[in-house]
């Protein structure tokens, strides 16, 4: 009789835990789905005549590699404002 009661108790606790897990997963999904996308600047300013080689978004910065008069340069821009934060000359 006690073994039957233990088995019944174990099954009901298992179902209860599965229900809590389902609710937790649903809440996390809902929060992640409704999160607004990160703000990204619409435009960045490059020197006139610059030829863009590549551009990518990485860790809160927009990285733009461009060539101007044969000099390759990497420019780092702030993701939200589009202002240049750093400029590194890669090659001549």
Image (cartoon, grey):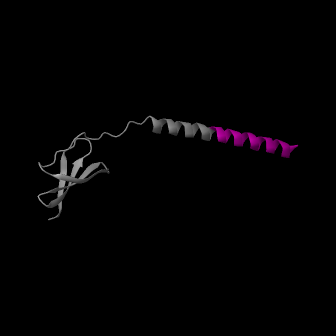
Q: Main secondary structure of the magenta part?
A: helix
Q: Residue 73 in the image: x percent, y percent?
A: 18, 58
Q: Is residue 15 left or right of residue 49?
A: right
Q: Is residue 11 magenta?
A: yes
Residue at image coords 38%, 36%: 36
Which of the two residues, 25 or 55, is positioned nearer the viewer here?
Answer: 55
Q: Is residue 54 magenta?
A: no
In the orientation shown, which residue stands out farthest toward the right?
A: 1
Which of the two residues, 6 or 65, is positioned nearer the viewer here?
Answer: 65
Query: Residue 8 is drawn in which quadrant?
Result: top right
Q: Residue 85 in the image: x percent, y percent?
A: 19, 50
Q: Which residues are magenta?
A: 1-19
Residue at image coords 21%, 43%: 82
Residue at image coords 13%, 61%: 70
Quadrant the N terminus occupies: top right
Residue at image coords 18%, 48%: 84
Q: Is residue 40 left or right of residue 31?
A: left
């Amino acid at each position: 009789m006690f073994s039957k009661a233990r088995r019944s108790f174990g099954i009901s606790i298992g179902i209860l835990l599965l229900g809590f897990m389902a609710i937790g997963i649903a809440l996390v999904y809902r929060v992640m789905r409704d999160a607004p996308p990160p703000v990204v600047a619409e435009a960045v300013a490059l020197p006139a005549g610059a030829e863009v080689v590549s551009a990518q978004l990485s860790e809160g910065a927009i990285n733009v590699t461009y060539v101007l008069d044969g000099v390759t340069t990497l420019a780092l821009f702030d993701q939200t404002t589009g202002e240049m934060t750093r400029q590194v000359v890669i090659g001549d």
